[in-house]
């Protein structure tokens, strides 16, 4: 036996750390009080959907959740996915569900079943094996007849039914009485080693079928919007936009906005349908929210019957791909394909909206567009979302630099330069996508950057030397604070044309 080459050259692959994933700022959570087929228990808080059709399948085509989803998924570029989240606006009575064994889609044709005259399979009912034998499918015309043969083979008083699901093209064995009854708890079918085994054809065996455990009726207590938001955040954090697909009271709007303003990077949207919401007085709920100056709530005024116009505005606002070149955009001028343009908005209405920071969708000389692309209070939507994206990218980049280094980032000026070098990648990325640009710095002095200096790169990261660090911070292994100056590229929303002429 020869000696191993490892005695001379010992080659090893070093483990590669995973980079921290950035937050998905395009993910919108639509809250609905509707139960549909998604919230049939008291624990499910959300479902993820990728189209309005997904929502229709869960809640029906006439549901408010589906109407909101139609408005959301109509925007271009279309969101890849969204959340539909539970909101118990009123006390919800969730009915009991039955024990069931649900097969997957049957691939065999009816003729394959008609060839079986001595079918058999072992079904586990209440922890006991029940033999279903003598299954003769030769006279079956369609798959409902197959279910009928299975039904006749079940023992009398078994309290079980065999249902043919035409939509899913599958067989379902289900308890006739809903509730958590151990006697009708079902398991997978198995080969009884007699007759012709049909469990695999019916897709009812392990690996093909799904076991549903029956549950008793439960009650979900009424929730405030903030409670629904809090409960979703506890179980799932990768979402950014908030919209309630139901009429909410002024108190509920205030409750929602208060939670969003205090949360870690969230924005919300609200459709204003009443004329009095544009009044500049302290009794107006929008005036009260405007005075909070959170820059986190976008409102769209609509008088055309589009109750969910604001979720379309939210979708447009959050559809930016920050990794792409020249992808940063302003929300003003954009079109809402699922919202009717309102040519009845007067100049007086427009001025009221602008004063509060309320958006509206109307036409300018026949061209439909959103105006003004602002959060309630007047902060531009693209600035709020862009700064959130920049902050999240910097945070994840710094974390990945620390965590992914196979050794360490030293607590020295050289180590600090490594961190700043990693953050510079993010700065360049946001210059490339058009959110940042060079210009004059008119902020406080940072490092060598002073008021009036030219910030050519559009960003500047600075840190003091570790020679100035306190002993307590050094012993705690803290880095020196990194300060960042960024110059927003902004967007042109209006222009004056001065024309001179001569004869």
Image (spheres, grey):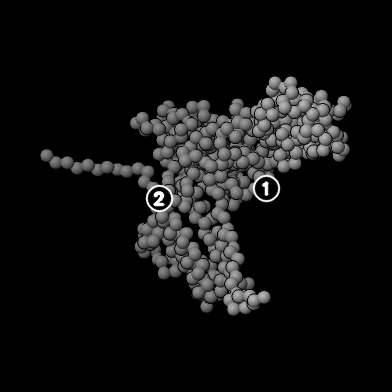
Residue 349 figure quarter: top left
Residue at 43% across, 48% down: 327
Residue at image x 36%, y 58%?
A: 439
Relative placement, left or right, of 495 versus 210 is left
Measured from the top left, where is residue 213 in percent x and y?
78, 38
Q: Secondary structure at mark 2?
A: loop
Identify the image quadrant of residue 493.
Answer: top left
Dot 2 alpha-carbon crowd within 10 angstroms: few under 14, some 14 to 19, many 20 or more = some
Residue 150 left/right relative to 404: right
Identify the image quadrant of the C terminus: top left
Q: Is residue 225 visible?
A: no
Residue 91: give x, y in percent of width and height. 73, 34
User: Which residue is situated farthest in the front direction here?
Assistant: 1
Rounded to the nearest angstrom, the CA distance separating label 1 from label 2 is 35 Å
Q: Please say whether residue 346 is visible from this viewpoint.
A: yes
Q: Are marks 1 and 2 in contact (CB under 8 Å)?
A: no
User: In the image, is 222 to the left or to the right of 5?
Assistant: right
- Across and down, in percent, residue 18 comes to 59, 60
Q: Name the foreground residue: 415 vs 464.
A: 415
Residue at x-position 68% and y-position 26% = 111
N-term mark: 1 or 2: 1
Total residue callouts: 2
Q: Characterize the local packing of mark 1: few (<14), some (14-19) or many (20 or more) Cα atoms within 10 angstroms.
A: few
- The numbered dot on residue 475 is none
Q: Which residue is mark 2?
A: 326
Residue found at x 53% / y 36%: 72
The answer to which of 459 and 450 lies nearer the viewer is 459
Q: Is residue 324 above or below residue 161?
A: below
> Label 1: which residue?
235
């Amino acid at each position: 036996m020869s000696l191993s080459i490892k005695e001379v050259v010992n080659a090893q692959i070093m483990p590669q750390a995973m980079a921290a994933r950035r937050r998905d700022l395009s993910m919108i959570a639509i809250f609905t009080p509707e139960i549909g087929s998604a919230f049939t228990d008291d624990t499910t808080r959300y479902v993820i959907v990728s189209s309005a059709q997904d929502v229709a399948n869960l809640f029906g085509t006439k549901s408010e959740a589906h109407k909101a989803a139609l408005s959301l998924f109509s925007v271009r570029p279309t969101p890849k996915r969204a959340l539909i989240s539970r909101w118990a606006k009123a006390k919800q009575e969730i009915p009991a569900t039955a024990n069931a064994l649900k097969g997957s889609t049957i691939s065999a044709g009816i003729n394959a079943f008609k060839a079986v005259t001595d079918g058999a399979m072992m079904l586990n009912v209440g922890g006991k094996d029940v033999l279903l034998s003598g299954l003769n499918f030769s006279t079956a015309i369609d798959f409902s007849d197959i279910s009928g043969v299975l039904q006749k083979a079940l023992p009398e008083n078994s309290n079980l039914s065999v249902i043919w699901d035409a939509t899913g093209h599958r067989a379902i064995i289900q308890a006739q009485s809903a509730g958590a009854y151990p006697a009708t708890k079902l398991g997978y079918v198995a080969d009884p080693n007699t007759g012709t085994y049909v469990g695999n054809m019916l897709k009812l065996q392990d690996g093909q079928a799904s076991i549903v455990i029956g549950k008793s009726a439960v009650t979900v207590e009424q929730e405030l919007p903030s409670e629904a938001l809090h409960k979703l955040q506890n179980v799932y954090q990768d979402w950014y936009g908030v919209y309630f697909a139901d009429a909410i009271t002024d108190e509920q709007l205030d409750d929602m906005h208060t939670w969003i303003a205090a949360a870690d990077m969230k924005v919300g949207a609200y459709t204003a349908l009443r004329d009095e919401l544009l009044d500049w007085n302290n009794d107006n709920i929008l005036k009260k929210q405007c005075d909070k100056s959170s820059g986190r709530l976008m409102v769209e005024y609509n008088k055309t019957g589009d109750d969910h116009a604001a979720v379309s505005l939210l979708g447009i606002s959050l559809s930016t791909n920050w990794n792409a070149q020249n992808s940063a955009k302003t929300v003003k001028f954009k079109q809402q394909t699922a919202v009717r343009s309102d040519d009845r908005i007067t100049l007086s209405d427009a001025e009221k909206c602008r004063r509060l920071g309320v958006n509206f969708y109307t036409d300018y000389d026949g061209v439909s567009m959103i105006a003004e692309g602002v959060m309630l209070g007047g902060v531009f939507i693209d600035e709020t979302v862009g700064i959130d994206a920049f902050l999240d990218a910097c945070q994840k980049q710094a974390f990945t630099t620390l965590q992914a280094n196979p050794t360490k980032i030293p607590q020295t000026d050289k180590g600090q330069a490594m961190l700043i070098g990693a953050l510079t990648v993010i700065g360049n990325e946001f210059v490339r996508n058009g959110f940042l640009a060079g210009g004059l710095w008119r902020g406080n002095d940072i490092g060598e950057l002073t008021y009036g200096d030219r910030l050519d790169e559009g960003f500047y990261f600075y840190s003091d030397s570790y020679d100035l660090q306190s002993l307590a911070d050094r012993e705690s292994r803290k880095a020196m604070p990194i300060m960042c100056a960024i110059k927003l590229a902004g967007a042109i929303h209006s222009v004056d044309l001065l024309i001179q002429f001569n004869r």
